[in-house]
Image (tube, rainbow, N blue to C red):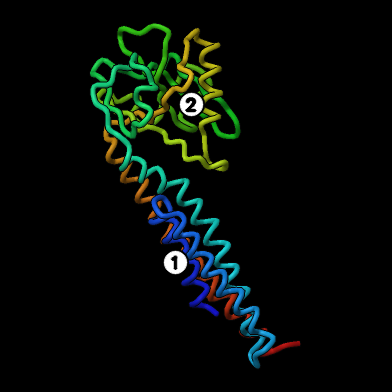
């Protein structure tokens, strides 16, 4: 009642962390197999002398499967999907800020020209619980049309202040594209777009219909590695914590089985 639920939880977390991006159908099939095993324990419990043990085991496995799916999907959308996307999407170099964003819709990393900069004087922070920050990426030839925006969370004030990532580093010329992970829980795109609309009204700029948001950094490889580290760290921490939870629940239910009152 300790090891089997923990193993189910850990395996499901591993599947969502490493396999879901490329083999989602196989992952769900394996989850269904785990669920069928949990149901089997419920089915055989009334027909067995150790019925309560199998019923408790079915409950613990069901709990492990549900938590494994929830936390596994969170890890996928929050960290691993972005990491895999940076591996698969294209890298563009010598990008002019005036080039249409639509021409680089498949970008994962963008290296802008030497005269490109984040215009912190036109930065804007949209507060919705967190502060969603945007600032236009411009060069010396542009005036009001903005195709690319540096973006970040809780790293700016309401107006004309932007401290996200390496915005103040003169050597930073790279943009790591903020990937729309498709998650209704963690996607920030709608908030960034609201910030852009407010910046249009406040500074008289015109944004592209579908602008590209980037994290303005000096070392894009470091950012990619960070997502991998966070994803693996989240997996290890969840597995370790659930092992403790499984030990406690297993011990409590084992005592309840021995002392039915």
**Mark linked to residue 11:** 1
* Helix, strand or loop under label 1: helix
Q: Where is residue 73? Give x, y as percent.
A: 50, 53
- In this view of the protein, can residue 258 be seen by the observer? yes
Rendered residue at 35%/49% (across/down): 228
- Looking at the rendered structure, the secondary structure element under dot 2 is strand
Q: What residue lies at 55% left-to-right and 56% top-to-bottom?
A: 70
Q: Position of residue 248 (x, y in %)?
A: 57, 75
* Residue that appears at 43% across and 8% down: 144
The N terminus, quarter of image? bottom right
Q: CA distance from mark 2 to mark 1?
A: 37 Å
Q: Residue at x 42, y 47 (%)?
A: 79
Q: Is residue 260 left or right of residue 175?
A: right
Give neighbour class at mark 2: few <14, some 14-19, many 20+ (Cα, 10 Å): many
Coordinates of residue 226 in the picture (x, y in percent):
34, 45
Does the rendering let one see residue 234?
no
Give the image location of residue 242, x and y in percent.
Answer: 51, 67
Q: Nearer the viewer, residue 107 or 118?
A: 107
Foreground label between 2 and 1: 1
Return the mark for residue 133: 2
Q: Residues within 10 Å of mark 1 (few under 14, many from 20)?
A: some
Q: Earlier in the sequence, mark 2 or mark 1?
A: 1
Image-quadrant location for residue 42: bottom right
160 shown above or below 84: above
Along the line of sight, which residue is nearer the eye, 37 or 203?
A: 37
Rendered position, 242 above or below 256: above
């Amino acid at each position: 009642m300790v090891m089997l639920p923990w193993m189910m939880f850990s395996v499901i977390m591993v599947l969502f962390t490493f396999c879901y991006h490329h083999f989602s159908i196989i992952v769900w099939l394996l989850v269904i197999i785990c669920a069928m095993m949990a149901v089997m324990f419920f089915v055989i419990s009334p027909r067995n002398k150790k019925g309560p043990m199998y019923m408790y085991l079915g409950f613990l496995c069901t709990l492990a499967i549900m938590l494994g799916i929830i936390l596994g999907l969170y890890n996928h959308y929050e960290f691993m999907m972005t990491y895999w996307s940076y591996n698969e999407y294209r890298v563009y170099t010598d990008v002019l800020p005036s080039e249409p964003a639509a021409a680089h819709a498949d970008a994962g990393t963008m290296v802008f020209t030497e005269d490109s900069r984040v215009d912190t004087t036109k930065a804007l922070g949209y507060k919705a619980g967190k502060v969603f920050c945007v600032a236009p990426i411009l060069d010396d030839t542009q005036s009001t049309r903005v195709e690319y925006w540096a973006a970040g969370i809780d790293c700016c004030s309401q107006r004309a202040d932007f401290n996200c990532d390496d915005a103040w580093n003169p050597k930073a010329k790279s943009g790591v594209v903020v990937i729309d992970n498709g998650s209704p829980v963690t996607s920030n795109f709608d908030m960034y777009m609201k910030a852009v609309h407010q910046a249009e009204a406040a500074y008289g700029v015109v944004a592209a219909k579908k602008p590209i948001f980037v994290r303005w950094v000096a070392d894009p490889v470091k950012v990619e590695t960070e997502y991998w580290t966070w994803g693996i760290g989240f997996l290890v921490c969840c597995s370790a914590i659930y092992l403790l939870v499984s030990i406690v629940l297993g011990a409590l239910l084992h005592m309840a089985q021995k002392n039915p009152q």
